[in-house]
């Protein structure tokens, strides 16, 4: 019986993920996270001998307790409950369940995380490290130094783009030459399809715009900006994160820096230039200004530390 219930869940789970991806336009990473959270939920229910179609709010509370006892962090717990809430709302709307066991429970609050960004000196050190090719060997794994330099330059352009535009890593890697608006040899802006399939135009600084325009001069319009080779798919998120970590280590920066932290760096620089929060919201593609407001909290915390010993 348990197997048939689980198999039924897997079928419905697949339909739900297709709904998220093709109807709601969620990114692959979001769908992957939802899939992972649902797998944890059904595994726990199976172990407890419970039917996912007949769960009660108390079952959800027990699930939260189970996660906490297994040292799952508050952010991860909140995400899992958010996932289940979205899933059961959809399942009830499509007559897969009669009741929503998440609706009545008190949702765990996500503790506020202060964003991490690079200070100006750290950005300079990072840029210097990326542009210094002395650490590239003449030959590694059958790859010549000129080939390795091209790879370094591809990542240099990717990381610089995020710092100059605030794009999410998924948005940057999805860019094609046709998405770049070039005027008189300068890339003025990039067309981005963000979360929920929402389109926005993100302007670029002129100095970087010249570099970007030059880099795509020989590319076809339907070619990915960060393809491994002409006509190929772009590099993976995992590869970009791994290369960024290598460059951050090379620069001697001790912070844990991911591509998303480069996005935070862009937002922080804008805030330091007194750019209005509503404009930063538009540039970053945040649906709610509440998401953007975290940067003002970060700024206040930073100021508090500066005056703490006065």
Image: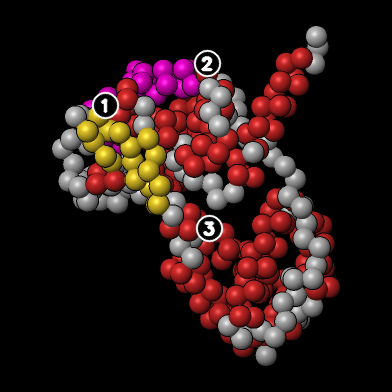
In the image, 29: left or right of 225?
A: right
* Residue with the mark numbered 3: 30
Residue lying at the far bottom of the rendered structure: 1
* Residue with the mark numbered 1: 210
* Residue with the mark numbered 2: 121
Contact flag, marks 1 and 3 (Cβ < 8 Å): no
Classify 294 as above or below 221: above
Image coords of residue 262 (percent x, y): 50, 33
x 44%, y 55%: residue: 198
User: What is the CA distance from the residue labelled 1 to the residue labelled 3?
Assistant: 34 Å
Q: Secondary structure at mark 3?
A: helix
What residue span does the magenta drawing correspond to?
122-146
Question: Crowding at label 2, few (<14), some or many (≥20) Cα neighbours within 10 Å?
Answer: few
x 66%, y 84%: residue: 97
Image coords of residue 239 (percent x, y): 42, 43
Residue lying at the far top of the rendered structure: 310
Observer able to see residue 128 = yes
């Amino acid at each position: 019986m348990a197997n048939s219930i689980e198999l039924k869940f897997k079928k419905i789970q697949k339909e739900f993920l297709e709904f998220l991806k093709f109807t709601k336009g969620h990114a692959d990473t979001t769908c992957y996270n939802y899939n992972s959270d649902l797998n944890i939920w059904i595994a726990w229910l199976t172990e407890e001998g419970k039917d996912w179609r007949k769960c009660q709010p108390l079952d959800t509370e027990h699930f939260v307790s189970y996660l906490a006892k297994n040292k799952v962090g508050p952010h991860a717990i909140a995400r899992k409950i958010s996932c289940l809430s979205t899933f059961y709302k959809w399942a009830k709307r499509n007559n897969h369940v009669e009741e929503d066991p998440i609706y009545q429970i008190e949702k765990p609050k996500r503790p506020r995380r202060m964003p991490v960004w690079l200070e100006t000196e750290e950005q300079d050190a990072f840029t210097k490290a990326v542009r210094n090719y002395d650490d590239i060997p003449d030959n590694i794994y059958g790859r010549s130094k000129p080939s390795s330099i091209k790879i370094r330059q591809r990542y240099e352009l990717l990381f610089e783009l995020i710092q100059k535009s605030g794009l999410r890593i998924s948005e940057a890697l999805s860019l094609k030459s046709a998405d770049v608006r070039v005027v008189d040899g300068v890339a003025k802006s990039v067309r981005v399809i963000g979360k929920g399939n929402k389109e926005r135009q993100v302007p670029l600084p002129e100095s970087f715009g010249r570099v970007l325009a030059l880099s795509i001069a020989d590319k076809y319009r339907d070619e990915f900006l960060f393809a491994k080779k002409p006509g190929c798919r772009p590099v993976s998120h995992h590869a970009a994160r791994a290369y960024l970590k290598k460059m951050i280590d090379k620069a001697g920066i001790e912070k844990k820096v991911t591509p998303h932290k480069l996005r935070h760096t862009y937002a922080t620089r804008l805030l330091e230039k007194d750019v209005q929060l509503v404009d930063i919201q538009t540039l970053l593609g945040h649906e709610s200004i509440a998401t953007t407001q975290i940067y003002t909290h970060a700024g206040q915390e930073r100021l508090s530390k500066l005056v703490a010993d006065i």
